[in-house]
Image (tube, rainbow, N blue to C red):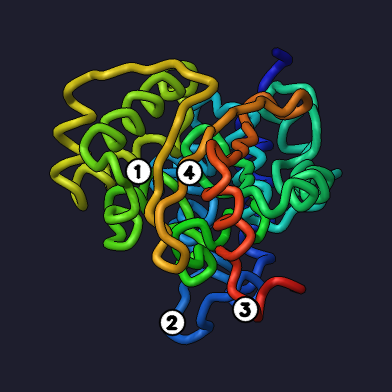
Amino acid sequence: MGTRNNAELARFLRTRREQVTPQQVGLAAGGRRRTPGLRREEVAARASVGTTWYTWVEQGRDVNPSPEVLCAVADALLLDPGERDHVLRLAGHQPGPPAADTVADTVQPVLDALLPNPAVVLNARGDMVRYNRAFRFLITDVEEFAPEDRNCLWLDFTDELWLGAYAADRQELEAVVARTRAIYAGSHADPPWKPLLDRLQAASPLFAQLWHAGLVLDAADWEKTIRNPLVGELRLQVSTFNLRDRPSLRMLTYLPRDEQTRERLTRIVPPEHRGA
């Protein structure tokens, strides 16, 4: 850990925020804006961090952000790799591997090579960083959801189709929360956790109940049974692999546990998407 320059970090982020237009990040340009560029709350939402926390960073407070969170902020501000490394150095971190999306680009051919078996790369909180077509349609088309909702934990507890997909229902959801809590123990200081957990507990009484139960399950492999609305029940073996250059990311592969599932996996991608 190097020497932090909170004042210069605050100035740099504020300057870059003022240079990004709403249109560049897909936001409507309407309405009166007191300052040029993006609002702080818009940057915070794009980076999945709290608005108050991000405001403190821009005020130069001593909040000690982690490299993973700084990379998320850099992505939200559309910084190039050199600018991202500059942000890391200002915060006292040595520039490490590229941001998650850049690393995931090199993993995408591996995910696609696993077809027709589903595979996905997730961050610690369950955000879908990259996935293949089979995972995209494992339950329903994940690209129908807004990017901020493409989170396995969020969909497991708030989307009707995802909630109905689990053949084990309550038992499976207990396991989902228990595995999440095990991951949370190693990354709970990262600011994006709080808004996600607050949002989930407000939206799902069941999640709130299971989260407060304190169940923990540290597992790299487990069995899962999913009801796919197109082809029926899928009996799957899920395996988890950490990515060597980004230990905060993990790849999940879903392999068939029987011949019926093996055949059904060849049909879960709708015909119009099979060559995409």
Q: Amino acid at mark 2?
A: Arg
Q: Nearer the viewer, residue 249 or 195?
A: 249
Residue 66 is tagged as: none
Residue, x 70% and y 42% (percent of image)? 100
Q: Nearer the viewer, residue 99 or 136?
A: 136
| Residue under label 4 | 54
**Local secondary structure at mark 4:** helix
User: Is label 4 or label 2 in front?
Assistant: 4
| Residue under label 3 | 23
Q: Is 3 above or below relative to 159?
A: above
Q: Is 252 above or below relative to 35?
A: above
User: Is label 1 or label 2 in front?
Assistant: 1
Residue 84's image quarter? Answer: top right
Please state if 48 lies on the left or on the right of 166 as rendered.
Answer: right
- Which label's residue is closer to the chain start, 2 or 3? 3
Report x, y in % for residue 193: 40, 35
Residue, x 64% and y 60% (percent of image)? 266
Q: Amino acid at mark 4?
A: Tyr
Mark-to-mark CA distance, 2 and 3: 15 Å
